[in-house]
Amino acid sequence: MDRRRAFWVLVVPPALWLAAFFLLPLVLMAVVSFRADLRGGLLTFPDLGLRQYAALASTPSFLRLLVLSSLVALAVAAVATASAYPVAYFLAFRAGRRAGVYLLLLMVPFWTSYLLRVMAWKLILGSSGVINSLLIASGVLDEPVSLFLYNRSAVGITLTYVWIPFAALPILAALQRIEPALMEAAFDLGATPLRRFLRVVLPLSLPGVLASFFMVFIPTVGEYVTPLLVGGSRGSLYGNIIQDFFTKAANWPLGSALSMVMLAMTLAWVALAARLVNLRQWLT
Amino acid sequence: MADVRRVGAAARSPAAPSGLGLYFFVLLLLLYLPIALLLLFSVNDNTTLTFPLRGLTGRWYAGVLAEPGLLRAARNSRVVAAGSSLVATLLGTMAALLVARFTFRAKLALVSLAVLPLIVPFVVLGASLLLLFSAAGIDRSLGTVGAAHTVISIPYVLLIVASRLAEFDPSLEEAAMDLGADYLTTLRRVVVPIIAPAVASAALVAFTVSFDEFALALFLAGRDPTFPVYLLGQLRFANRLPILISLAMVMTVGTLLLALAAERLRRAR
């Protein structure tokens, strides 16, 4: 087999598979989002229009939830990235020979079942949970309080917790690329440690910081399972209404329109991120 | 993932904001606390998960074996993960070879198509696949979940294998072809042996990605659920929690071993 034929043998299967199970469903969803209803089945295309988008635009609660979900994701990404920075710094410059072991220890929680970790937070924050039962056993409280679970802050705390180890990785990679000679030069020229950090280390690690931020932000915007588990009715995010319209409410055209809006927003964020960070450099 | 081996070399000291080590270990403690709690309650002799503890028991772990629904869900997850990992590894490796060794006009389109699944929100991807399978008249099953999992695993395989391919010199292959080997032989005798550890690592990563996945599975699983979907359905029955936690613990150890094996393979040269 020559290289020319090899090329076609290699390109056809992955391209077809991704076209069938990734591109086609999204195109179908885009079409469905322009339909008024599903009369006549999924594969007919009667008069397409903007009715669902009009409904979406005229329902303030959808838009409010979209903004709110973005804000939650923004906060989660910011806190997770900021919390991860000292971790990465420690691993890069302070941990010495044990850095490898420490990094492994940091990643183990990330490899344990996501559902299990979220369940653990439910266990800690719940009304019969660890915090409450400890407070009652120690006499601080007489009755359990339900303050800790089923609201948006519980969703935020849980998501931040889940992402911190992951957020440390791009920052660590960026810190490791800094030439030690640069820091020596700053030292020789009389920079104080703080000044050296602010003027040399921090600017050089900013691409890693941005990569971390977006690697947390993007999946968090579309999150719907964590709110389902620890958010309750007061903690639901935009992803939850999409899920509702596809399952309980079974209004697929409206659900599709909501999905398209979320997809457009996510792609816009990614385009922004790609401009700020050289994505290709940081993904590999 | 960050390269650990270079850390030691870079461990020079730009003077210290002190307390960094303390911060790291307190954070580590916080990360392990919830997992430790689950482990604790999986051997605690009490149906509800509250303090004070009531003493040691192994009955939750033993109880797992008497739960056919639970064991079936765990088996389903293994089947889906194995199947989707196999397909994703094959397709992802093909894409990686194309990206690293061929020049063609649609390259950027192919890379985007293969990496975009990481960026499209899972709730959108899951719902759109639900639409597709309904339109095609395909009932939801383990197969539909598996198809979705291949799509989200391909980016990982592509990135892992392509970065391995980027590390070794294409002239090795050119030499083999110049000496008369056709492409298939070159692939089999030169390329595959070199990228084998990366491919194996990618397969394990794809397995763990699928095994733990539920945002897509929730949309696409039929009446025969995968483990995370089953777990999610059972969480509202409080008295079932200890048994669920026990099995989840066992499965976590399994995933962990796979993840560690993948990491080792990825670093093997």
Image (tube, rainbow, N blue to C red):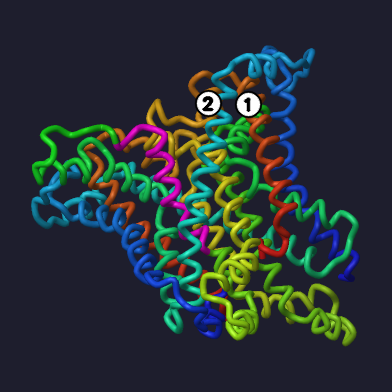
| Residue named by callout 1 | A258
Check disc 2 and give the amino acid type: Ile
Q: Is residue A161 magenta?
A: yes
Q: Is residue B167 above or below residue B69?
A: below
Q: CA distance from mark 1 to mark 2?
A: 8 Å
Give residue B243's position: percent from left, percent from top: 25, 47
Dot 2: element: helix
Chain of residue at mark 2 = A
Q: Is residue B129 above or below residue A100?
A: above
**Side (left or right) of A111 relative to A186:** left
Give residue A202's position: percent from left, percent from top: 59, 66
Check disc 1 and give the amino acid type: Leu
Give the magenta range.
Answer: A148-168
Q: Are marks 1 and 2 in contact (CB under 8 Å)?
A: yes
Q: Is residue A163 magenta?
A: yes
Residue B27: which quarter of the image? bottom left
Location of the N terminus of chain B by quadrant is: bottom right
Location of the C terminus of chain B by quadrant is: bottom right
Marks 1 & 2 on one chain: yes
Q: Mark 1 Cα within 10 Å, few/some/many (few <14, many 20+)?
A: many
| Residue named by callout 2 | A241
Give residue B148's position: percent from left, percent from top: 60, 44
Residue depicted at x 85% and y 63%: A7
Chain of residue at mark 1 = A
Residue A188: which quarter of the image? bottom right
Dot 1: element: helix
